[in-house]
Image (cartoon, rainbow, N blue to C red):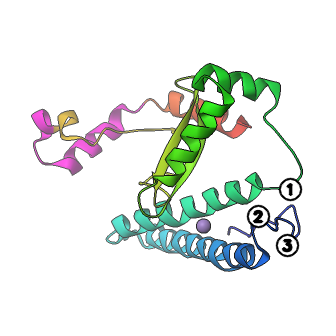
Amino acid sequence: MLKIKELSYPINSLEPYYSRETLDLHYNILYKGYIDNTNKTQEKLENSRRENNFTNIKCLEKDLSFYGSGVILHELFFENLTPPIPTSPDNELLEEIIKDFGSYETFKSQFTSASIEVEASGWCLLVYVPNFKKLEILQCEKHQDLTLWGCIPLLVIDMWEHSYYLQYKTKRPKYINAMWNIINWNIVNKRFREAKNYK
Ligand code: MN
């Protein structure tokens, strides 16, 4: 069961930039809603596993992604805020920002523009992409687009047609059942160990 994470500052301490009323609504009502719905979804998934009944799986996986990503992004968001005292990127981050964006000002312009132009409901994020060894700015629509932010993939299966059509035609179940025989669990184990030690 997920629990609400405490704020590290008083609820009125972001004023005047972020009002007590706004934060109260955002934190106590909306964020709590994501926690509750993620817990409900986890419970439904637990029941599905217990009953070995996955007829509703597509809906549940979507809910997990939406609500779960909602929890994670809100926790990052609240943690990202502080009462108005001056803070700044440290030397290490600033060096990376300058390397990847040219200057702090350019980074700020790109981030600001990207935030303004997020389509409909979504987020703007500064992220580190270990694969690229680089900072990037992302616009996220809704909370997820079917991922959980910050997750570390352990096992991936390509479900694009190009990965199975020649051999299995439209029979996705046959393909996935076959793949279970050829998974390198040593690699999955290794990734899991690393993921657990991450941070
Ligand atoms: Mn929100």
Left or right: 136, with 199 as reference point: left
Residue drawn at point x = 73 percent, y = 69 percent = 3
Q: Which mark is residue 84?
A: 1
- Is 23 drawn above or below residue 195 in the view shown? below
* Mark before the other along the chain sequence, 2 or 1: 2
Which amino acid lies under the numbered mark 2 shown in the image of this protein? Tyr
Q: Main secondary structure of the magenta part?
A: helix
Q: Are marks 3 and 2 in contact (CB under 8 Å)?
A: no
Which amino acid lies under the numbered mark 3 shown in the image of this protein? Asn
Q: In this rendering, which labeled residue sits more in front, label 3 or label 1?
A: 1
Q: Which mark is residue 12?
A: 3
Residue sitting nearer the eye, 64 or 10: 10
**Res 12 quadrant in image:** bottom right
Quarter that holds the N terminus: bottom right
Residue drawn at point x = 18 percent, y = 34 percent = 162
Report helix, strand or loop for mark 2: loop
Which residue range is magenta in the image?
Answer: 165-183
Q: How crowded is mark 3: few (under 14 residues within 10 Å), some or many (20 or more)?
A: some
Q: Residue 63 carries which label?
A: none
Report helix, strand or loop for mark 1: loop
Ligand 1 within 8 A of label 3's CB? no
Q: Provide residue 141's location: percent of width, then percent of height.
A: 44, 56
Residue drawn at point x = 54 percent, y = 38 percent = 110
Residue drawn at point x = 13 percent, y = 40 percent = 168
Q: In this rendering, which labeled residue sits more in front, label 3 or label 2?
A: 2
Left or right: 165, with 50 as reference point: left
Q: Do the residues labelled 2 and 1 touch (CB within 8 Å)?
A: yes
Q: How crowded is mark 1: few (under 14 residues within 10 Å), some or many (20 or more)?
A: few
Residue 170 among magenta residues: yes
> From this viewpoint, is residue 150 visible?
no
| Residue named by callout 2 | 17
